[in-house]
């Protein structure tokens, strides 16, 4: 039988051939036989995969994929704008609540003054004060 050229054999046949003829490779683990069969490792390649994508391309984190970084930046900007709008609306709401609180205090003071005046005049308000109170009621209704 003629010796078989290692280059003409497939990877599995090369492994078997190496393990049968080389006493040293029989003593080594199967990984070493595979290394003999496939040859020197090449960085950036996946053994047995060929021209398909390499593992770093297959298992790349989603956030690092092309195009995703732009989408994330746009989403972050949009979120920041929305958060700023929410903060502005909260500030406006606080201003309105403060104005309402001031108006309630004024109203309470006016009601207290009204009770005091009514009690002093025997239950009847003077005409000028009654007119002024009516004008206040007309303003609050607007």
Image (spheres, rainbow, N blue to C red):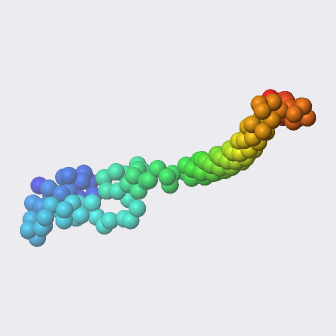
- Measuring 14% from the left and 56% from the top, which residue is drawn there? 16
Relative horizontal placement of residue 132, taking residue 47 as reference (left or right): right
Residue 81, position as x, y percentages in the image: 67, 48
Question: Can residue 124 be seen at all in this image of the molecule?
Answer: yes
Pick the residue in front: 5 or 109. Answer: 109
Position of residue 85 relative to residue 35, above or below, is above
Residue 46 image position (x, y, % from top left):
35, 56
User: With respect to residue 106, does 42 lie above or below?
Assistant: below
Residue at 40% x, 62% y is 44
Residue 54 visible from this viewpoint = no
Residue placed most toward the observer, 80 or 59: 80
Locate residue 34: give its quadrant.
bottom left
Q: Is residue 51 above or below residue 113?
A: below
Image side of residue 42 versus residue 79, left or right: left
Q: Residue at x 8, y 68 (%)?
A: 27
In which quadrant of the rendered image does the N terminus lie?
A: bottom left
Q: Count the marks.
A: 0
Residue at 81%, 35% (x, y): give it. 121
For the C terminus, give its image quadrant. top right
Residue that sits furthest to the right in the current view:
128
Picture coordinates of residue 18, whole percent (x, y): 15, 61
Along the line of sight, which residue is nearer the eye, 139 or 118?
118
Residue farthest along the bottom direction in this orientation: 24
Q: Nearer the viewer, residue 117 or 51?
A: 117
């Amino acid at each position: 039988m003629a010796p078989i050229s290692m280059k003409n054999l497939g990877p599995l046949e090369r492994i078997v051939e190496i393990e049968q003829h080389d006493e040293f490779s029989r003593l080594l683990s199967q990984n070493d036989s595979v290394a003999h069969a496939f040859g020197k490792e090449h960085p950036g390649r996946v053994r047995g995969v060929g021209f398909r994508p390499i593992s770093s391309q297959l298992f790349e984190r989603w956030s690092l994929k092309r195009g995703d970084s732009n989408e994330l930046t746009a989403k972050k900007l949009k979120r920041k704008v929305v958060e700023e709008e929410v903060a502005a609306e909260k500030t406006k709401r606080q201003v309105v609540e403060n104005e309402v609180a001031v108006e309630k205090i004024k109203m309470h003071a006016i009601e207290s003054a009204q009770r005091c005046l009514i009690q002093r005049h025997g239950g009847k308000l003077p005409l000028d004060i009654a007119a002024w109170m009516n004008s206040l009621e007309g303003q609050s209704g607007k």
